[in-house]
Amino acid sequence: MLNPPKQVPEQVTEALRQAESVVIVSHVFPDADAIGSQLALGNILESQGKRVFYYCQEFALSLHEFIPGSKQLSNKLPDISQFDVGIAVDCGDRYRLGEQMDTLLQIHPFIVIDHHAGHKEFGDIRWVEAGRSSSAEMIFDLAQALDAEISYRAAFCLYTAIVSDTGSFKYESTTAYTLQVAGHLLKLGIKPSEVAGKLFDNYTVNRLRLLEKVLGSLKLYFEDQIAVIKATNEMFEATGALREDTEEFINLPRALRSVKVAAFLKETLEGYIKVSLRAKGECDVSLVAMQFGGGGHRNAAGFRIKDKTLGEVSEDLLQEIKRRL
Amino acid sequence: MLNPPKQVPEQVTEALRQAESVVIVSHVFPDADAIGSQLALGNILESQGKRVFYYCQEFALSLHEFIPGSKQLSNKLPDISQFDVGIAVDCGDRYRLGEQMDTLLQIHPFIVIDHHAGHKEFGDIRWVEAGRSSSAEMIFDLAQALDAEISYRAAFCLYTAIVSDTGSFKYESTTAYTLQVAGHLLKLGIKPSEVAGKLFDNYTVNRLRLLEKVLGSLKLYFEDQIAVIKATNEMFEATGALREDTEEFINLPRALRSVKVAAFLKETLEGYIKVSLRAKGECDVSLVAMQFGGGGHRNAAGFRIKDKTLGEVSEDLLQEIKRRL
């Protein structure tokens, strides 16, 4: 047993103990923390004899199919009358539940488990800790609070989620407790190099060719404090790389010594410009993203925009970032 | 107190308890584990009233100057009669001590603390554990065995060393105990994002421009199982990047899904071709490196060679790797 920084609220464990059939929801376009937390929690509840439905409106399975249980994810919400508890994991606000938001929130009690800093309250039972590295770290605590054994499969989901959401224990959110939890998961048989390999060493040659081109687009502004890289339709066509192949690219301009904010602008197949933002210093990029209808964390945020060119978005974005540096 | 996988040999603690004046040596061209372990051990011994001299024949301070105490490193070995104990940390064989090897090994007792798999025994008191993530993990145990308090400064050195030698807890060598030790160091005040920032987010723009060119050199062989990248004199001149700026570059071709062995060939200012090798599968690249007079770990090794062209070295190397795939 590890001793968490805060105890799991009793309302959460109580509601889950009484539940027989639950639906667990992760946010639209889920990252590995969302999916890993969702699947681990489901596995834990199933081990306690509950029926679990795994719902997510929109997900790119190719990136996360190595996470055990990911094939159980469904984007079709069945009749909700069969569920006596709803749970959202890793959702910073109700809109992240997707288009079925209103239907889902008719399930009572609806439990919300999240670690996002700018979390906007929703649901009936709220367990939100912005100081946590990941939602998965909280699910680990929940397993302990429920006296549930963590299976190898749940451990794999949790470890993957924690590694993904902390950039392999590099981000500010990593605490001594995070490392304790991760250490405990290794004792359950997880191999760190296997997880890291699946999460990070997953490049295709096309992806590396795309990276070369994206690096060629690097521009620096405002005494080299802002770095901007771009991935255009043309680059995707020339290299044969996929849209999801750009994961992690932004960490390279972010790694520049002088850079306080890095931005990555990508043309999507649906005609959007998708923008990812990363900050290292004082600038809160979630505020920048909000100006454009997006959101996220202090150090990592994003948004997407239509009917503008890459150049226009870049120009507007630079103004907004400069204001906040 | 943490419970290490193996106890520190009593001979080591005994010799150190009795010592008054020690010289600690790290290997030529030290990495962050070598320097971090050396400086942490020295700080620990100084806190116990010993006099410590920090020797290393050749080091590139610019990369590691953020490691506290690194300015104490000296490449001039004084009269050895003043030392009653010699210690080598992170040295896989005696030749890694550098040109003063014979002089250094006249100090008795000479303690050797190392975690390299292909370690070749030398010195009087040998504490070698190939299963450890880093030499720093062993120095942590040594501090515990000596009942020494670990200062913030020593903790910073140790955490940096562990993170560096495990690729931020991604490599196979990372164990539950490694994460426990790292968690303990965080409790002493270390900020993971600060260490990661210093170790990894330390790119200059020139360095990123060089990366673009190096990625442009990517070639794949043998059903895409071998990836080779190159950094030529011309690339360094065109970008203004430094020779040490190539750190971590090899992890990109290594991250290719199909790749079992990645090689990085670099022209040095002294007219050598320096070769770094990384393996993911069954191939033991330390054996490949040995064929060319180098060495290292199973998954990470290297060598350097003179009087050959990049093309010639690449050709010979490919033959040697193919033999072992």
Image: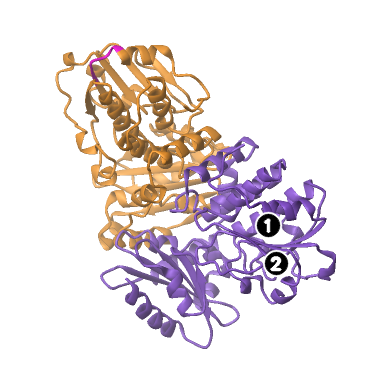
Chain colours: A orange, B purple
| Dot label at residue B56 | 2
| Magenta stretch holds residue A245 | no
Mark 1 packing: few (<14 Cα in 10 Å), some, or many (20+)?
many
In terms of secondary structure, where does tag 1 sit? helix
Front one among B290 and B60: B290
Residue A319 percent coordinates (x, y): 50, 41
**Amino acid type shown at disc 2:** Cys
Q: Name which quarter of the figure residue B93 lies in.
A: bottom right
Which chain letter matches label 2? Answer: B
Q: Magenta stretch?
A: A18-22
Q: Are marks 1 and 2 in contact (CB under 8 Å)?
A: yes
Residue A314 percent coordinates (x, y): 42, 46
Report how many numbered discs are placed on residues in the image. Answer: 2
Q: Name which quarter of the figure residue B262 lies in.
A: bottom left
The alpha-carbon separation of the residues under discs 1 and 2 comes to 10 Å
In terms of secondary structure, where does tag 2 sit? loop
Which residue is at the far left? A79
- Left or right of B27 in this view: A6: left
- Left or right of B200 in this view: A317: left
| Magenta stretch holds residue A19 | yes
Question: In this rendering, is residue A286 above or below B299?
Answer: above
Residue A128 percent coordinates (x, y): 44, 21
Front one among B87 and A71: B87
Q: Are marks 1 and 2 on the same chain?
A: yes
Residue to which mark 1 is pinned: B38
**Residue occupying the point 32% across, 31% down:** A40
